[in-house]
Amino acid sequence: YAAAVARRRQSIRAFALAGGGLCAGLIGVGTIRSARRDRVWHDSETLFRQAVVDAPNAYRAHFMLGAWAFEHKRQREGERELRRSLSLFPYDPYVAFNLAEQYRQSNRCSAAVPMYRWIMNMNKNFPLGHTGFSICLLETGNYAEAKRSALDALRFGGDSAALRRVISLADSVSAATEEKERSHGVVLVGTPSKVPESMQKTAGNTRSPRDR
């Protein structure tokens, strides 16, 4: 009996030692993983990239990485990630708005207009982007729609100075076009064909309480 008790005590001691070693090993692995994760969280670039790796089908992960890339002047990467975000979830107007604004600020209004238009068609009460949409419509020659959009933007509380300038230019171009047609093809000198750069900067830098 004494021998059996001794053997059992030895088995219990061996199990305890093995269990202790296993726990220590698990704690060690957890510590290493935690340290690695801490490095990720302390580096925004790595954090956003790791989020895409961890959740490749999460639209917000691509959105955050794209916004980060644009902020650091990596235009192609930013555009790629925001478009990937839209392809995964095409119902968040903030993603389309950010991409539209990047296009407009890069003088790519022809690419921005479809983004703005998609936002307005999806949610006419979305408060952002109305001023930029009006400016890009004017830039791309959609004068009548630019005026209508500018009037809508004013009702949303957009930048009144920029929007009234859009309305004025749209009216001027429309009047000049009509006069040209009545003159049977006589070219009028001074007809505005491009939105003044100061207006583009105004739309990009101005944020009203509801930024339209």
Image (cartoon, rainbow, N blue to C red):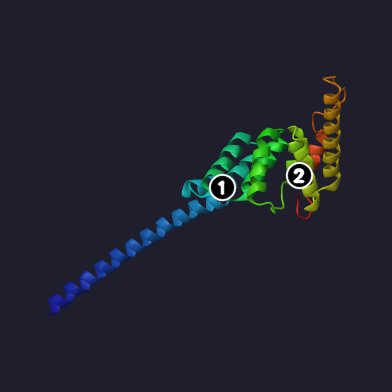
Residue 157: tell me if it is visible. Answer: no
> What label sits on residue 90 in the rendered view?
1
Q: Position of residue 197 (x, y in %)?
A: 81, 34
Q: Disc 2 designates what residue?
A: 149
Tag count: 2
Indicate the amino acid at tag 2: Ser
Q: Residues within 10 Å of mark 1 (few under 14, many from 20)?
A: some
Name the side, left or right, on which 14 lies relative to 204.
left
Q: Nearer the viewer, residue 105 or 65?
A: 105
Q: Position of residue 60 (x, y in %)?
A: 56, 50
Q: Which element carries disc 2, helix, strand or loop?
A: helix
**Is residue 58 depicted above or below 201 in this figure?**
below
Which of pointers 2 and 1 indicates the residue nearer the eye? 2
Q: Residues within 10 Å of mark 2 (few under 14, many from 20)?
A: many
Q: Nearer the viewer, residue 74 or 83?
A: 83
Q: Which element carries disc 1, helix, strand or loop?
A: loop
Indicate the amino acid at tag 1: Pro
